[in-house]
Amino acid sequence: MAEIKDKFWLDAEKAALVVIDVQEKLVPAMNQDLYKQLILNANLLVEGFKSLGLPIIATEQYSKGLGHTVAQLNGATEQDCIEKMSFSCFGEDKFMTALENSGAKQVLIVGMETHVCVFQTVLDLLDRGYIVHLVRDAVSSRFKSDYENALSTAAQAGAVITTTETALFQLVKVAGTDGFKVVSKLVRQRTS
């Protein structure tokens, strides 16, 4: 059943993290419980990906109007954020180039809003043959009903709905390695 493992098991040699539109002026409109969870878990994933030397791609939707990526998202934007106007990240050539250059076949998605930019990007990724892991505890919307509908519909479309810890431990696979030690320390710091 290699197809099952290929889809549901993240592989550090094939994975990239995409951080979508976690921007200053969007924050007040978000469901605050979902947003707090997003910041905590997106930071864990960013730190995990950085420590494992894996690619991270970050986007900003119309930053002139919506501001830049929030300061609380440590390290996600050490490289330049990709500015976009379309809701799907695939509306921006720089995103497609960055994703191709990463060599990733599996894409972990975090960000906001779950039912707009995140969801449309998930559909475009799936349509182009990528394996998509949508991190349910690292995405947010204004309304929980939109968040829940987007997760459900993304799963129906073929995305794997996952969690932060599931993703991180899949990437390291075994205990005792340097990667495991870093990930283990990160998740011990997690408070919810």
Image (spheres, rainbow, N blue to C red):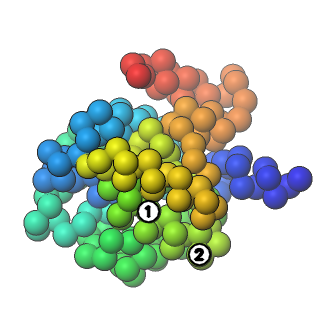
Secondary structure beneath label 2: helix
| Mark linked to residue 119 | 1
Query: Among all residues in the image, which is located at the extreme right?
Result: 1
29 and 44: which is toward the camera: 29
Left or right, 157 with respect to 147, comes to right
Q: Is residue 41 left or right of residue 28?
A: right
Q: Find residue 63 and name its label.
A: none
Question: How many angstroms separate mark 1 from mark 2 (CA)?
Answer: 12 Å
Residue 127's label in the rendered image is 2
- Check disc 1 and report its element: helix, strand or loop: helix
Is residue 47 visible to the viewer in this orientation of the structure? no
Q: Height in image: 96 above or below 56?
A: below
What's under tag 1, amino acid-wise? Answer: Phe
Q: For the point 10% across and 66% down, which residue is it?
A: 65
Q: Is residue 189 above or below residue 130?
A: above
Instruction: Name the foreground residue: 61 vs 159.
Output: 159
Three-letter amino acid code at the position of disc 2:
Asp
**Residue lying furthest front in this view?**
145
Residue located at (59% from left, 76% from top): 128
Q: Is residue 61 above or below residue 155?
A: below
